[in-house]
Image (tube, grey):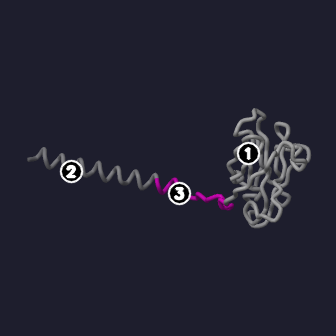
Amino acid sequence: MYFAQKYKVSSMYARLQNILIVFICIFISSCGKKDNPVPVTELNYKVIAVESDPRYVSLRTIGGSAILVTGNICAGYNCNGVVLYRQKNDGAVDDFVAFDRTCTNEARDCAMEIDKYFPDLLVCPKCGSVFNMSGRYMEEGPAMYPLREFSCDFYNGDLRIY
């Protein structure tokens, strides 16, 4: 009888200890954590023959970037636009990446611009944050979050951004 009571108490203590550990882990991991201020937006756009389109001449080489021209279609959060970046030239489906131009520090109304000397960098004209498109990370702050990324498929010369 003594063994059964001791076993019940120790197993109950172990359960309480596990519950407490889980609670502490959840509490610590959620403390001070903020989400990216730029929400995920939807886009479904296709650039026909992107490599021969004169608007995208800079995308013919690795490391080139260009602002997506959508006419009157709103692209990106608050219609700040989308930038295309050529990460490789293999003729493969993943040759390109696309990013929402909205700065994650100035999310309301600031579109990042392509650096004129380094086309793999986007610079926020308001806060000075720098985003590295080739590495997909914020190189300089105050922005703390990377830009929102869209999926791209490059097939038969056409580029689909979604």
The numbered mark, 3 or 1, whose residue comes first in the sequence reads 3
* Secondary structure under the numbered disc 2 in the rendered image: helix
Residue 25 at x, y = what percent? 46, 52
The mark total stands at: 3
Q: Name the residue located 72 percent from the left edge and 46 percent from the top edge.
A: 137
Bounds of the magenta segment:
26-41
Q: Does the residue at mark 2 contact the one at mark 3 (Cβ under 8 Å)?
A: no
Q: Does the residue at mark 2 contact the one at mark 1 (Cβ under 8 Å)?
A: no
Residue 63 at x, y = what percent? 82, 39
Three-letter code for the amino acid on which mark 3 is drawn: Ser
Residue 30 image label = 3
Placement of 15 over or under 79, stated as above or below? above
Q: Residues within 10 Å of mark 1 (few under 14, many from 20)?
A: many
Membership of 100 in magenta stretch: no
Q: Is residue 40 left or right of residue 68?
A: left
- Is residue 58 at all visible to an observer of this figure? yes
Name the image quarter holding residue 42. Answer: bottom right
Q: Name the residue located 72 percent from the left edge and 58 percent from the top edge.
A: 104
- Which numbered mark, 2 or 3, is in the foreground of this view? 3
Q: Does the residue at mark 3 contact the one at mark 1 (Cβ under 8 Å)?
A: no
Residue 97 image label = 1
Three-letter code for the amino acid on which mark 2 is drawn: Val
* Cα separation between marks 3 and 1: 31 Å
